[in-house]
Image (cartoon, rainbow, N blue to C red):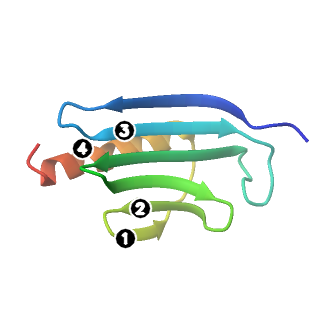
Amino acid sequence: MPKAKLVLHAKYVDEQGGLVEMKVYDVPRTPATPYGFKYSLVYVYKGHRLIGYDNHEHQGDHRHFHDTTTPYVFTTIEHLIEDFRRDVAATKKELGQ
């Protein structure tokens, strides 16, 4: 069975001290990953995950927004990153940043 191949990894601390990390792997297509990607995008501020997008094997595609977890409809990596960045920007605005 082919192994997962890392196709994107970005990790940095923003100007307010928040941690942004994005990882995307190219994986074999399975019922759990019908489009062939595993991903994890997270924004952590002061030790708390405020935003997260991922597709765990048992939960499927979903979005963490503050204390709420909801299903996420994956279309493309580009759209995923756009949605994530939009949520991070909105959260920073809420925090007064």
- Tag nearer the camera, 3 or 1: 3
Q: Residue at x 26, y 41 (%)?
A: 18
The reply to whether dot 3 and dot 1 touch (C-beta < 8 Å) is no
x and y, in percent, of residue 72 in the image:
51, 61
Hey, what amino acid is under mark 3?
A: Val
Which residue is tagged 2?
64
Cα gap from disc 4 to disc 1, whole angstroms? 17 Å
The mark that comes first in sequence, 3 or 1, is 3
Q: Residue at x 43, y 69 (%)?
A: 69
Hey, what amino acid is under mark 4?
A: Ala
Instruction: Using residue 95 as the reference point, say whether residue 85 is left or right of it.
Output: right
At mark 2, the secondary structure is strand
- Tag nearer the camera, 3 or 4: 3
Hey, what amino acid is under mark 1?
A: Thr
Q: Nearer the viewer, residue 66 or 31?
A: 66
The mark that comes first in sequence, 3 or 2, is 3
The mark that comes first in sequence, 4 or 1, is 1
- Tag nearer the camera, 3 or 2: 3
Question: Circle 2: is it few (<14), some (14-19), or many (20+) Cα within 10 Å?
Answer: some
Which residue is tagged 1?
68
Q: How many marks?
A: 4
Which residue is tagged 4?
89
